[in-house]
Image (cartoon, helix red, strand yellow):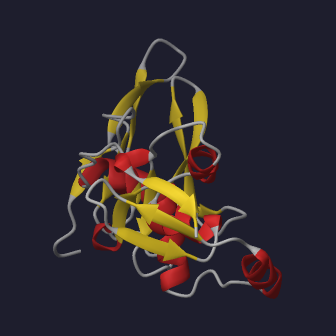
Amino acid sequence: MEGEIWRPVYGYEGLYEVSNFGKVRSVNRWVPNGKGGTISLNSVALRPSVNTFGYFMVNLCKCGKTNTRLVHRLVASSFLKNEHGKKIVNHIDGNKKNNYVSNLEWCTASENTKHAYSIGLMRITECMRKTMNRSRAVVRIDMFGNSKTYHSLTSASICESVSLTSIANNLAGRSKYCKGGKMFKYA
């Protein structure tokens, strides 16, 4: 296809390649035939299967050992810089089967959750709403003295990209600051 770029799969160089369109293929190569000779294996497009969470995955074999890999992670690892060491690959349009590199980005778990809520993949359930109504409001104060009020610890955690444990420890006085010099107090 026009514009399709193929790169080696990290850890499987010389065996498999992944494209910026989210396709995976084996590479032409010579392999031992078990009788002292070698045989030629032609490049073959791998047919992905779908895991229980709806993501495409492929089986890659190296030295007789087969490993299952998620296609979107293969694409991101080969095509996207991860300067901040983020661990999650997000599908920007929310479609888990759209593995084009232009639809992928590295993010944190918190950023991924916020994104899912913002595009409607996750909704606040009635049970969550009742819990939030009973929750105590908290105020975030940054190192410049700016403050923002959240209706619950959970919403503060999601919006500020700070773990619930870190906020709870700060509120209880077990830590002076959270990530990024933020402090929290009950409203």
Quadrant location of the C terminus in the rendered image: bottom right
Q: Position of residue 74 (x, y in %)?
A: 40, 51
Q: Nearer the viewer, residue 18 or 15?
A: 18
The residue drawn where x is 42% and y is 27% is 31
101 sits to left or right of 41: left
Q: Nearer the viewer, residue 118 or 144?
A: 144
Quadrant location of the N terminus in the rendered image: bottom left
The residue drawn where x is 72% and y is 78% is 132
Q: Is residue 125 above or below residue 52?
A: below
Q: Is residue 61 above or below residue 89?
A: above
Q: Is residue 84 above or below residue 97?
A: above
The residue drawn where x is 32% and y is 67% is 146
Q: Nearer the viewer, residue 23 or 72?
A: 72
187 sits to left or right of 162: right
126 sits to left or right of 139: right
Q: Nearer the viewer, residue 157 or 134?
A: 134
Q: Position of residue 76 (x, y in %)?
A: 34, 55
Q: How many marks?
A: 0
110 sits to left or right of 173: left
The residue drawn where x is 81% and y is 83% is 130
